[in-house]
Image: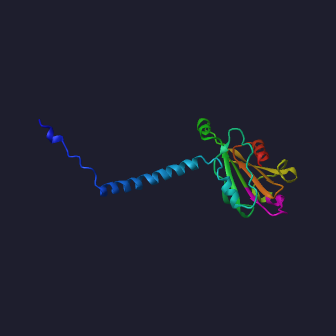
Amino acid sequence: MSFKKFQFSNDSLSNKAKVILGVLAAILLLPTVTLVSLGYVKANDTDYGYSNAKSQVAYHIYKPSLVLKELVNATKFVVGKELAGKQNAVRVAYDVPFDVMVKTGQSKPIVVTQVGIESGFNLDTFITSFMKDATPQKITLAAGLNQTGYLLQKPLGNSTLSAVVYLTNDNVLLTLMSPKVSSDELIQLASSLK
């Protein structure tokens, strides 16, 4: 058997082939590296869109100084929601971490919606139409204007939909709602909003 059958001449790639190979590598690698980098940046966004939302509205956006035990941001801060007839409300949700939800099979979502309103806004009138079939109960809330807020509850299937609604000293209307969290936990989260 002869080794000549397996010998090849060492012809290097032509310049044209090198250019084509370089262009193909750039076309395939550059978008991949860009997408992976962008995904990494977004995954490490611990701000949850707060700074972006803050730059889009003229009122102070409240967020918890301490999120309740075992609650994390479930969504980013989203601008453009409706509250009290205003279309520039900011909404964010908090819930238990995903791994806890998988282990326990329980979710505890809390949705916080807020909007800047004009001075002289009538909270009592708003409360009567905010949640149908719920009886508002006045509560003492340190974060509220005149240390006042409202607790609303109504049956919702096998649970109770609870809401805490209040107005701040700087004319921001806040609502905190949850079908799974106790009224005490809602009030505790409302008290931590800064």
- Quick one: 25 or 193, which is closer to the camera? 25
Q: Quadrant of residue 97?
A: top right
Q: Quadrant of the N terminus?
A: top left
Instruction: Kindly give the residue lying farthest to the right in the view shown.
Output: 146
Q: Is residue 185 magenta?
A: no
Q: Is residue 56 above or below residue 143?
A: below
What residue range appears in magenta? 114-126
Instruction: Kindly give the residue lying farthest to the left in the view shown.
Output: 1
Task: Give the image location of residue 75, x and y in percent.
Answer: 63, 50
Residue at image coords 69%, 59%: 55
Task: Give the image location of residue 79, x and y in percent.
Answer: 67, 59
Residue at image coords 82%, 60%: 125
Task: Give the image location of residue 52, x and y in percent.
Answer: 66, 56
Task: Give the image location of residue 10, x and y in percent.
Answer: 23, 46
> How many marks can you see?
0
Q: Is residue 141 left or right of residue 56?
A: right
Q: Is residue 74 above or below residue 88?
A: above
The colour scheme used here is: rainbow
Q: Is residue 122 magenta?
A: yes
Residue at image coords 61%, 48%: 45
- Quick one: 180 or 37, which is closer to the camera? 37
